[in-house]
Amino acid sequence: MAANLPPLMPKATAVWLIDNTTLTFEQIAEFCGLHPLEVKGIADEDVAKGIKGQDPVTSGQLTREAIEAAEKDQTKRLKMAAPKHKMPAVKLKKAPRYTPVSKRQDKPDAVYWILRNHPEFADADIIKLIGTTKATIQKIRERSHWNAAAIKAVDPVTLGLCSQLELDLAVTRANEKRERQVKKTEKRGERLRPIEESLGHAAADHDVAEAPDSEGAAAEPETTEP
C-alpha cells in the first residue's frame, strides 16, 4: 500500500485510471489504496459496477506528467500531487465533557467533595473536570441548592465522573496556578515596599523640618521700650 494518502474517491479514481491509462493494476492499486485483485475486479466489471470514473488530473490529485512517467516505467509509483492552494489549519473546538444521564445526579456530590478537599480549585477547574456549571457550583457552595440536604461529599473518581489520572492532573495544575499567584503577589509587595519606606522617610523629614524650635524661641532677645 502507498505511504501517502489515497485519493478522495479511490474506486472512482481507479475506474478512470483503468479506462484512460496503461498503468498496471499494482500501480493503480497502490495509488488508490486498494488491493491489486480489487483493481482487477474493477477492470473485469465484477467490482464497483456502475461507478463513474473520477479524473484525478482535473481534481489536482495527479499530474499528466506523473501518469506518463509511470506508464513508461512499471516500477515507478504514483504519488499525490502537491496541493496548489494551502488549506488553513482548522482548530477543532473541544467538546464539553459528556456525562451519562445515570451519573448526572452524582455531580453535586462530586462538586461538594472538591469544594471541601481542594479549595485551591477555581470554578473553571471544577467545570472542566466534572462538566457542571458555575451556577450549580455557587449554589452548592452557599448551600442553596434545591437538594442541598441530600448532597454528600463523594470522590468524583468513585462516582465514575473522571479518572484518578485526570483528578491528579487537575490538582497539580490548580496548585501550580496558586503558587504562581502567590509568587506574583510577593514580587508585587517587594516592589512596593521600597516606595512605601521612602515615602515614610520623606514624611518624617517633613515633620522634623516643620517642628517649632523651642530653644530658638526662648533665646530670642526681649525688646525694651526706650
Image: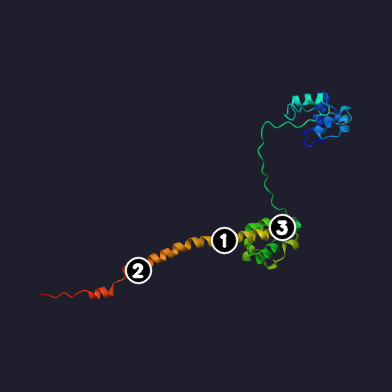
Q: Quadrant of the N terminus?
A: top right
The amino acid type of the residue labelled 2 equals Asp
Spot occupied by residue 110 in the image (x, y as percentages of width and height) = 70, 62
Q: CA distance from mark 3 to mark 1?
A: 26 Å
N-term mark: 1 or 2: 1
Q: Quadrant of the C terminus?
A: bottom left
User: Would you name the residue on which mark 1 appears?
Assistant: 183
| Residue 92 image-quadrant placement | top right
- Between circles 3 and 1, the one closer to the viewer is 1
Q: Pick the residue in front: 32 or 118.
A: 32
Residue at x 63% of width, y 59% of height? 176
> Circle 3 — which element?
helix
Looking at the picture, which amino acid does disc 3 mark? Glu
Q: Percent from the top left, x then y, of residue 171?
A: 67, 61
Would residue 56 appear left or right of 171 to someone viewing this image? right
Q: Going 72% across and 64% down the picture, which residue do you hit?
A: 155
First-in-chain label (3 vs 1): 3
Q: CA distance from mark 2 to mark 3?
A: 61 Å
The reply, left or right, for residue 216 in relation to residue 195 is: left
Against 175, is 8 above or below?
above
Residues under numbered marks 1 and 2 in contact, where contact means CB atoms less than 8 Å apart: no
Would you call the spot at circle 1 few (<14 residues within 10 Å), some (14-19), or many (20 or more)? few
Q: Earlier in the sequence, mark 2 or mark 3?
A: 3
Query: In this rendering, does residue 179 appear at all?
Result: yes
Q: Nearer the viewer, residue 73 or 103?
A: 73
Disc number for residue 166: 3
Can residue 144 be seen here?
A: no
Q: Quadrant of residue 128?
A: bottom right
Q: Which residue is mark 2?
A: 207
